[in-house]
């Protein structure tokens, strides 16, 4: 009998933790200015009353929201020290164009610290292919 009580308490605490995780995830999603489609998916699936009906993480990651440029950029920058020179060259060559497609707020609030990190600033590929473009005004900006 005591085993069942303790197991129930653990499940209750896990459900509370999962609910908090879902709430934190949804606030992150909202901060990233995601689509209404993904918000609906998150509310209906990730916060389902019955935990067994919630999708597995692998299924959630297949959603088109996770193929967005911001997430791929942030993920690559987080793993920058272990990337090969070929991967860095490809990434930093395409990075400037990808950044122009992001909202200014996302760039300034979410990515600027990572893009100005010592890993990026000291990387020869980034210095050659990206840093010169970082200090260039945005397209269409008038000189003041």
Image (tube, helix red, strand yellow):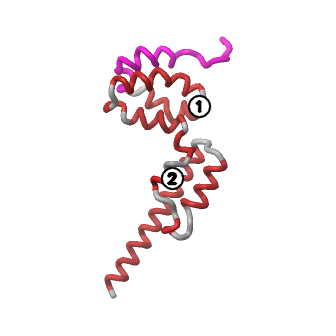
Report the magenta residues as a range.
118-144
- Residue carrying label 2: 60
What x and y, as percent, mark residue 54? 51, 63
Distance of mark 2 from mark 1, alpha carbons?
Answer: 22 Å
Q: Is residue 82 left or right of residue 23?
A: left
Q: Residue at x 53, y 57 (%)?
A: 23
Cβ atoms under marks 2 and 1 closer than 8 Å: no
Question: Nearest the camera: 141 or 45?
Answer: 45
Residue 100, quarter of picture: top right
What secondary structure is found at the residue carrying circle 1?
A: loop
Query: In the image, what residue occupies the spot 51% across and 53% down?
Result: 60
The residue at the point 35 percent across, 21 percent down is 123
Disc sitting over residue 58 in the figure = none
Q: Earlier in the sequence, mark 2 or mark 1?
A: 2
Quadrant of the frame with the N terminus:
bottom left
Q: Which residue is mark 1?
A: 102
The secondary element bearing badge 2 is classed as helix
Comparing 87 with 120, the one in front is: 87
Is 18 placed above or below 31 here? Answer: below
Local packing at callout 1 (Cα closer than 10 Å; few below 14, some 14-19, many 20+) is some
| Nearer-the-camera pick, 103 or 52 | 52
């Amino acid at each position: 009998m005591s085993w069942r009580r303790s197991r129930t308490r653990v499940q209750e605490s896990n459900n509370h933790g999962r609910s908090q995780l879902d709430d934190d995830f949804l606030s992150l999603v909202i901060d990233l200015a995601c689509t209404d489609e993904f918000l609906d998916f998150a509310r209906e699936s990730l916060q389902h009353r019955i935990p067994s009906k919630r999708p597995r993480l692998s299924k959630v990651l297949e959603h088109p929201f996770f193929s967005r440029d911001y997430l791929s950029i942030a993920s690559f920058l987080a793993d920058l020290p272990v990337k090969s020179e070929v991967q860095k060259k490809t990434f930093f060559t395409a990075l400037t164009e990808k950044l122009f497609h992001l909202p200014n707020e996302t760039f300034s609030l979410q990515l600027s610290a990572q893009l100005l990190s010592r890993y990026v600033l000291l990387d020869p590929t980034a210095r050659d292919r990206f840093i010169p473009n970082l200090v260039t005004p945005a397209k269409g900006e008038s000189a003041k």
